[in-house]
Image (tube, grey):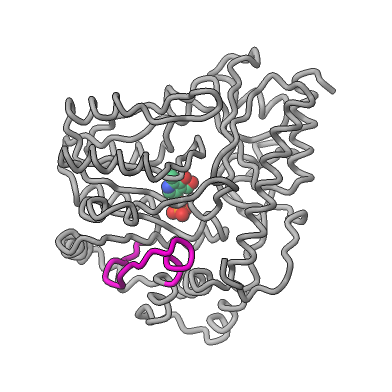
Amino acid sequence: MMEGKDRQVPDFSIAKDLRHDGSIKWMQPEGREDVLGMGTADLDFDCPGCIRDVFRPITESNIYNYRYKPDEYYDAIISFFRRRYGFEIGRDWISNIPGTIAAVCIAIRKFSSEGDYVLMHAPYFTPLKNTIEGSGRRFLVNPLVLRGDRYEIDFEDFERKIKEYHPAIFLLINPQNPTGRVFTQEELERIVDICAENGVRIISDEVHSLIVYGGHRHIPILSVSEEARRISIQIFSFSKGFNTMSLPHGLILIADKVMQREWHDYLMPYNFHYASNSFAIASVTAVAGGAGDRWLEALTGYLEGNRDHFISEVRRIGLPIVPLAPEAGYIMWIDCRNAGIPYDTLGERFLDDAGISLNNGLEHGEEGRGFIRLNFAVTRQCLDEALQRMSRMFGKA
Ligand SMILES: Cc1ncc(COP(=O)(O)O)c(C=O)c1O
């Protein structure tokens, strides 16, 4: 990874108390003050210093007029894909929308018609299901299959669903939320081949791709093949890696010239090109340009440590739950089918008995029955507190 400008060694063992600062993740239920926020997918850590540095001149100038995106913004994004993936993208591929879900929503509306099916893996990230159905499209799932401790694509079912239902779009989430799978070149090629043969476009949501653990490699959909570039729309944001969720800035990359033109025409009435947020543009320019690379590398190391620590502690203590190691991101998908808790009450039980706010797997579809989703982007101290509370909950302490 390129040398970043953030010279300070970040200390991820420190986090502010976020219980009363407007954080959704740490929002306390009525009458409680002790709940650990381990649901919503954001980080408990401060942003890298490079972000504060680029914000200072903006607040000092106190000018928030309509602004164009400078060349440095585009150059930084192009350099990011070159640096991280050795992949050359064009400036005309890039557009942005405030928010990646909004980007998926608009792309679905543009590249499919009312009543069309949109196919997705399951378990899934529910706001995207809501986006599909809220746009008058029909939601169709290709369940991932748990083999051992890893989810795999059931290609037979994938192809059968495509041939039977003729979805207009396959909405790929890569890395996948909530299973943490990072799809391989071979898997992506197979997806692209099946979609291309059957006239299905791919929208690839890659917001979890900044944090990828040892032994795995994220592959942007547009870098898979010429065929992939012909049929795919790639959606990405820097927010999951750099904790800039409240500065929503979804990036949409389209390589195919015809699709590019159609997309830009479709976006025109929204007037987004007049709605550039100075802070989002500045932070994207800084981190895409490499100023946060060292910070991100350190964060990834810390989170990988959290992931491994949690899994080995659960085993050592003998908790009746089975965490599955994510290949990317900071969401742990945990099998609780042998925990002796009714599946529909898993969320409440962890909240009431352990004071941990997390997500019931059922929030991610039927395929999440018996699972929970835990965000481990917290300090090691907080993670240990969660483990202690779970030990007490299961009578192991
Ligand atoms: C798969 C997926 N897509 C999109 C989003 C929204 O990301 P952003 O806040 O960067 O727009 C999330 C957030 O958790 C997500 O998990």
126 or 172: nearer the eye?
172
Report the side of 110 relative to 60 (left or right).
left
Q: As rendered, which of 68 and 353 lies closer to the eye?
A: 68
Q: Does residue 90 belong to the magenta stretch?
A: yes
Residue 195 point in image, percent of width and height: 22, 40
The answer to whether 179 appears left or right of 30 in the picture is left
Q: Residue at x 42, y 45 (%)?
A: 174
Residue 269 shows in this picture: no
Identified at 21% across, 34% down, the residue is 117
Residue 165 falls in image quadrant: top left
273 relative position to 290: left or right: left
Residue 359: x percent and y percent?
A: 56, 33
Q: Please, which residue is most extreme toward the bottom here? A: 61
Figure check: 7 above or below 230:
below
The reply to whether the magenta stretch includes residue 83 is: yes
User: Magenta segment, which residues?
Assistant: 79-97
Q: At 65% from the left edge and 71% from the top edge, which residue is drawn?
A: 49
Task: Work out whether residue 69 can be spotted.
Answer: yes
Q: Quadrant of residue 333?
A: top right
Q: Percent from the top left, x then y, of residue 15?
A: 73, 55
Residue at the image position 66 percent from the left and 37 percent from the top: 30
Quadrant of the frame with the C terminus: top right
Q: Nearer the viewer, residue 105 or 154?
A: 154
User: Which quarter of the figure has residue 183?
Assistant: top left
Total labels drawn: 0
Q: Report the side of 286 relative to 271 (left or right).
A: right
Query: Is 258 situated above or below 121?
Result: below
